[in-house]
Image: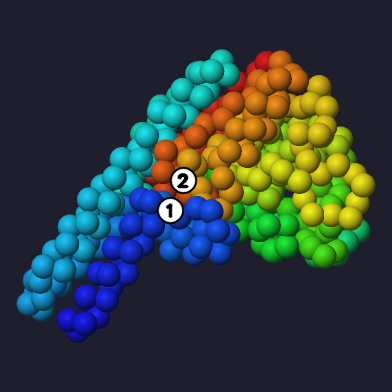
Amino acid sequence: MPLFVTALTAVLAFSVLLAVRPVKGNPLVANVSFYAGVVTSELPLQVLTLVALLTVATVAVGEATVLAVVLLGGSAIGASLLLRRAALARDVLERTLREMGVSAARRPRPWATLLLRPWPRLPRSVERVDALTYGPYGDANSLDLYRRRHQPPGLAPVLVHVHGGSFRRGRRSQDARLLLYRLARRGWVTVSPDYRLLPDGEFPANADDIVAVIAWLRTHADELHVDPDRVVLAGSSAGAHLAVLATLRGARVAALVGLYGYYGSQRTRSQVLSDPARYRVDDAPPTLIVHGDADSVVDIAGARRYVEHRRLLSQVPVALAALPGAQHGFDRFASLRFYAVCDAIEDFAHVTFSR
């Protein structure tokens, strides 16, 4: 038992260290840093609780050595810093929205839920319609749809969220579940599609699948009771890249959101341009880019370059919210930080719809 407590304390301290100071640069090391630190980075409340429990266990088994005190004390200080960084997300997002002419509404934080239920759960008031087909490529062209069981009158706004996975892995309803569930509970229809992955989904096939999702929504708008003029297209990581390219390749949406996205070129044999910065942006929708300044997988510099490109070539609103201390994959959790991101997306969408 003492050995187990010491080992767990050491592992926790290592995870907190990589969350506070993620390692960037070498792709292999950066990915190890991400996987070892992302849960700790997003769930500092749970980390502080675990530190308290380990402290009690350490004292109980008589192992309150200098090493144990250093590891537990360092973990507590690090988790407190992570909590502070997570809390700053709301201020950063509100400031970013003000730059776009959007007034943010401050909402109370569900602290009990944040502590006790950090994993998103499908609300009872929301139904999930599985595996609807939007295109000819079998399971790769399937989507999940979420909506309130008792929809309010009128046409619903729509969120389409594209999952990440480096263009070669991942599946629908993997990322941003809190956002999908929350907006559905508020009367939206939310959609999470699969798309063709490598090797079959070599660009432009993957981006064209997302264009097809938007076309499918427009075709079926009446039977789904959705408003085709109030569609927000969002994506995470590689999904953000595909969402951006889809809008540049014909998908008409009211607003665009990128979460910890990659905005460079894809590896492809096609002569079709896969770099968003190589396209004209005259018809690009209002865009909110959200990225962590501690992202060790996709550096925030790419998001900054894309936003500057947009600002140079178009007057359509675009802004970057650089979240303090946020890692890649921050939308996997019902965390303090992602609650703030969901607030910002909702406020951004409603103001964009009204213009």
Eyeballing the image, is 114 above or below 65? above
Q: Amino acid at mark 1?
A: Pro
Query: Can you give x and y, in whole percent of width and height, for residue 292 in the image?
Result: 50, 42
Eyeballing the image, is 348 above or below 223? above
- Other-residue count near label 1 (Cα within 10 Å), few / some / many at <14 / 14–19 / ≥20: many
Ranked by sequence position, the earlier of labels 1 and 2 is 1
Q: Quadrant of residue 281?
A: top right
Q: Which mark is residue 106?
A: none
Residues at badges 1 and 2 in contact (C-beta under 8 Å)?
A: yes
Eyeballing the image, is 135 above or below 290? below
Q: Amino acid at mark 2?
A: Ala
Query: Can you give x and y, in whole percent of width and height, for residue 14 in the image?
Result: 33, 64
Which residue lies at the image location 74% right of the left edge and 38% below the top edge?
244
Residue 33 horizontal side relative to residue 61, left or right: right
Which residue lies at the image location 69% right of the left edge and 41% below the top edge?
263
On-image quarter of the C terminus: top right
Q: Residue furthest front?
A: 26
Circle 2 sits in a helix, a strand or a loop, which is it? loop
Residue 166 shows in the view: yes
Q: Quadrant of residue 214?
A: top right
Which residue lies at the image location 17% right of the left edge and 81% below the top edge?
2
Residue 11 horizontal side relative to residue 344, left or right: left
Q: Which residue is mark 1?
A: 22
Residue 218 shows in the view: no
On-image quarter of the N terminus: bottom left
Circle 1 sits in a helix, a strand or a loop, which is it? loop
Q: Which residue is mark 2?
A: 294
